[in-house]
Amino acid sequence: MARTKKQIQTRQNGLLSQIKWGESYTSLFLGAVVVVVALVLVFSFLRGRNDQTQQTTSTSVTAEEQVVNGKIVPKVYTVKEGEDLWHIAQGLYGSGYNWVDLAQENKLTDPNYISVGAKLTVPNVKPKELTTDEVVATQPASIKATSYTVVTGDYLWDIAVRAYGDGFKWVEISKANSLTNPDLIYPGDVLKLPR
């Protein structure tokens, strides 16, 4: 049976269109497989990450650590550059007021001076918070008189705040007392406070 050229070409075009149709399904199938594999990988990654987080959270406290107020803190803390007891306590306890506990535990003679690299024993105490009454009690009393006797730790700025409610009025106190160097006032000095 002799087929004509036109019949053969029509037959070939039909096969090609079937093959192309088949290629479309093949591409669609392979694309779906790639998407499913990608989803499985993402799911596995997220699940593994979640398991790691749970393992990290559920790990027990080591011998060098302790739990303070639900937070894991070291038993021994190494002082870093620029730190003071207040900021160390703030980081460990969430309250800077616990600096007193750190100073007492480590028997520090001068809590204002701690050296870099010093090892501090961290006591297991609750975070401290000052009550309103304690805050009021820690503030120095205001000055109502027209003169003031300087005590240890006084500065003109602080005296001006207590006397006038404005630290910048230290200049007036300095002028009224003819101070040549306002940074040098000594305990026992009596300062006139202009009103």
Image (spheres, grey):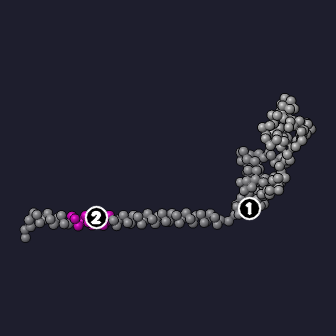
The amino acid marked with disc number 2 is Glu
Name the residue at 20% across, 66% down.
Answer: 15
What is the C-alpha distance between the residues marked 1 and 2? Answer: 65 Å
Vertically, is 146 above or below 133? Answer: above
Q: What residue sits right under mark 1 in the picture?
A: 68
Is residue 152 toward the left or the right of residue 74 in the image? right
Asked whether residue 41 is drawn in magenta, I would say no
Q: What residue sits right under mark 2 in the picture?
A: 23
Q: Say which element carries label 2.
A: helix
**Boundaries of the magenta span:** 16-27
Instruction: Look at the image and tell me whether residue 107 can be seen.
Output: no
* Circle number at residue 4: none
Is residue 190 toward the left or the right of residue 12 in the image? right
Asked whether residue 18 is drawn in magenta, I would say yes
Quarter in which the C terminus is drawn: top right
Q: Nearer the viewer, residue 107 or 95?
A: 95
The quadrant where residue 38 appears: bottom left
